[in-house]
Image: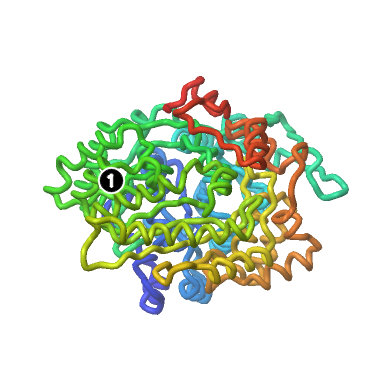
Amino acid sequence: MDKKLEKILPLVQKPARYTGGELNSVIKDKNSVDIRMAFCFPDSYEIGMSHLGIKILYALANAREDTWCERVFAPWDDMEKKMRENEIPLYALESGDPIRDFDVIAFTLQYELCYTNVLNMLDLAGLPVRAADRQSLSPIVIGGGPCACNPEPIAAFFDLFTLGEGEEVNNEILDLYADCKKRGASKAEFLRLAANIPGVYVPSLYSVRYNGDGTVREIAPADGAPAKITKRIVRDLDGVFYPDTFVVPFIEVVHDRVTHEIFRGCIRGCRFCQACFLNRPIREKSPETINEQCKVLCRNTGYDEISLCSLSSSDYSGIEALLDKLLSWTPEEKINVALPSLRVDNFSDELLEKLKSVRRSGLTFAPEAGTQRMRDVINKNVTEEEMLETARIAFSGGYSAVKLYFMLGLPTETDEDVEGIGLLAKKVVDEFYRTPDRPKGRGVTVGISASSFVPKPFTPFQWEPQATREALLHKQQHLKETLPSKKINVSFHDINTSFLEAVFARGDRRLSAVIEEAWRRGCTFDSWGDKFKFDVWMDVFRDLALSPEFYANRARNYDEVFPWDHLDYGVSRAFLQREDEKSKEAKTTGHCRLHCAGCGANQLNGGRCDV
């Protein structure tokens, strides 16, 4: 370990965040590899080490003989201060080497409010934050993850982005880089060649022109770059690479367990949900493959819990067969099976019986809206009767704690819709006391979590405005004042962070200057409430003469050019517009297993969708 680093570690919180050396971390001889890659998560170690994507892509890159991939996380304030005071550049955990000397620096972009951390990590590494100021072939700075669906606000800082799923495209980029490095090619040549890899977006090869009203007029490619970049998907989840081991942290992290992805995409089509549409078409992994991979992961990590990961776990067509297989060996091994992301309209007695044999905790469901009209607007396709029937099944099965997720500020929402949230929660409370075989000697706990609606790209609501901050404050207060029972607890997400999230979700390239200036004025870890400097952000917008309300609170016309219109995630714009139009009449669209609504994403999979 570096002597300077050894000196400062006893002076910071949780030094194990910064030491490396964990079980199953990959160590290679740096002199025997051609490519050194830093995989960066722009948030704390505890959050990054819980993320499944970084585990998959870390193992995938290290499966290559020519590549050594190492992990990097954003150091907390105390560690950053000591690193800067002692001139310790940002380093990779496995080797302790400065990442400025690596070939590839890859960031996964999971949340818009991590953007200033990206800049801070590049600066802490001793690198210019803007891509145009990094002239040499190394390091190439890559971005991926869900925020890459509209990377324009951070386009100035990245050399390229990968759209969609990374298991195949990442290897193609590394192959190209290895060839360019061997030939002594320039960065410009590498980027021109990379732009022709399907799923790769090189922002420097595209120019943007604006209309007089500030909207985008045109996005024009240059140097042979494609006019439209289509996301990459993995067609065969049974055959795709999946790790046989995870790095096991020394300290507790947010999700300290085996996480296993059971399928990608979602059949439901909730109109606010970006993840649903970004991850289509639906593709499932077989119960046999999942079961065997879970066995191997538990054996190689020592974890005593498996979490089955998806956007809607009870929509997995083989869920009961999978649970049968897992429960044939996990109880004996004292391994718990967690099944998050359950739907209220397919939570059955049979599924409850399966869950009874695992460690019981509270159940979480997401009605999203309190009235049927509002649920129809968002295409939730859940009725109050189904919600209460689900509660009855859960209570009769021994559960006494339920958490309900809702959103405030959805399009067309009224005060009556807001009041309906509390009324629905009260009916769940009443259902507990009406259930004869409920848990005896215990009271019911019903929690409401109410977030603020954020319009996102590639959703039917991408044209809709976010409610103003004043309107959202009114809605929060109205919900608190109209709660009909003291047995209901309510919590709210911060309105200002949701506002900034909406700004960057639908933003354009002009926001790069805002992000850079806010970072220079001390903004980092913006998703953390005690770190968020909302007033600083507003000062920057004012000083740079840009209106955040222009991005967050403005309704779009159907013919407006979006900053992300040159990127294709498979779901057609015509389908999204039809869904938005139906929402205004509170008309629903059935889920994919009832009938195909023609979203278009199946064309990415040769016309196939695993519904």
Residue 43 point in image, percent of width and height: 48, 61
Q: Position of residue 288 (x, y in %)?
A: 25, 31
Compared with 407, 590 (above or below) is: above
**Residue 298 versus residue 534: which sits nearer the camera?**
534
Looking at the figure, which quarter contains the N terminus? Answer: bottom left
Q: Is residue 338 above or below residue 201?
A: below
Residue 561 relative to residue 476: left or right: right
Q: Which residue is mark 1?
A: 245
Tell me if residue 90 comes above or below residue 181 in the rendering.
below
Residue at the image point whose x is 59% and y is 32% from the top:
571
368 with respect to 57 (left or right): right
Badge 1 amino acid: Thr
Q: Residue at x 75, y 38 (%)?
A: 558
Left/right placement of residue 417 relative to residue 225 reads: left
Residue extending furthest left? 332
Viewer-side residue, 367 vs 243: 367
Quarter of the image with the C terminus is: top left
